[in-house]
Image: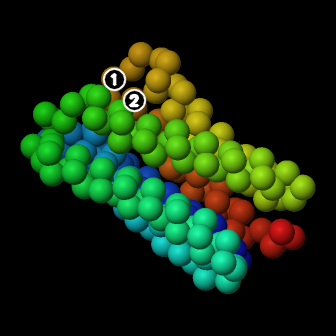
Amino acid sequence: MRIVQAIQSFAALCGAIIITFLQPQRDEIGPYLIATWALLVVSSIWAVSHIVTALIQKKKRAYISNGIILLFFAAYIFMCTEHLIDHSNGLSAGNFSGLIIINGWLIPGGIAVLAVAIAHQKFPKIYKDNMTTAVLFLFPALAIIFIPMDTVWHVGLLDASLIFTAVHLGIAAASPQAKA
């Protein structure tokens, strides 16, 4: 069992559960606030996975690189919290700020995971796992940007991305350890 992928799979699953099971209340809460709550949980747990990564690797460069990543997670968590405070009345949450919250997770996350995949091209298992995760982040983001759709579709694509990410990382966590 690869603990980091298991934690990240659990995080994505938590976010998917929040979005899926709050859909009946979407008219009262607002789709973007549901997505923001989900991404707040996902990013918080995902940040823990980077702390675990640094502790497992026990190298100075792991502490530095994961520390930098944690700064970005802290900024994103702050952004989600501010969005929830500013738009606590749900349906007044603007489309632009909701899109920033969703694509603020999918695009930088997808690019970061893509960079990790490219950096590990010599290790086929690590490369393939990270490339798959990058695609699961970037395709929904591109669809949200280039295809005209309403807020429910935006949150639905985020939910689909989280569901597929949870399944993919769960399988990756249960698969044999890759040589790094």
| x and y percentages locating residue 122 in the rendered image | 90, 55
Colouring method of the image? rainbow
| Residue 31 locus on image (x, y percent) | 27, 39
* Pointer 1 local density, CA inside 10 Å: few below 14, some 14–19, many at least 20: few
Q: Is residue 136 left or right of residue 120?
A: left
Q: Which amino acid does label 1 sit on?
A: Asp
**Residue under the point 83% across and 69% down:** 180
**Can residue 6 be seen by looking at this rendering?**
no
Which residue lies under the disc numbered 1? Answer: 150
- Marks 1 and 2 sit apart, C-alpha to C-alpha, by 6 Å
Q: Is residue 152 above or below residue 11?
A: above
Give amino acid for label 2: Trp
Label 2: which residue? 153
Residue depicted at x 40% and y 32%: 154
Q: In the rendered view, tell whether residue 134 sits above or below residue 42.
A: above
For the N terminus, give its image quadrant. Answer: bottom right
What kind of element bears circle 1?
loop
User: Which residue sits at x=54%, y=27%?
Assistant: 142
Determine whether label 1 and label 2 are within 8 Å by CB: yes
For the view shown, which residue lies furthest in the left direction?
89
Q: Can residue 148 be seen from the camera position used here? A: yes
Dividing the picture into quadrants, the one containing residue 174 is bottom right
Q: In this view, does 45 lie to the left or right of 109?
A: left
- In this rendering, the answer to whether 150 lies above or below 27 is above
Mark 2 residue crowding within 10 angstroms, few (<14) / some (14–19) / many (20+): some
x, y (%) of residue 94?
A: 21, 31
- Checking the image for residue 6, the label placed there is none
Relative to 163, say whether 174 is above or below. below
In the visual, does 155 lie left or right of 59?
left
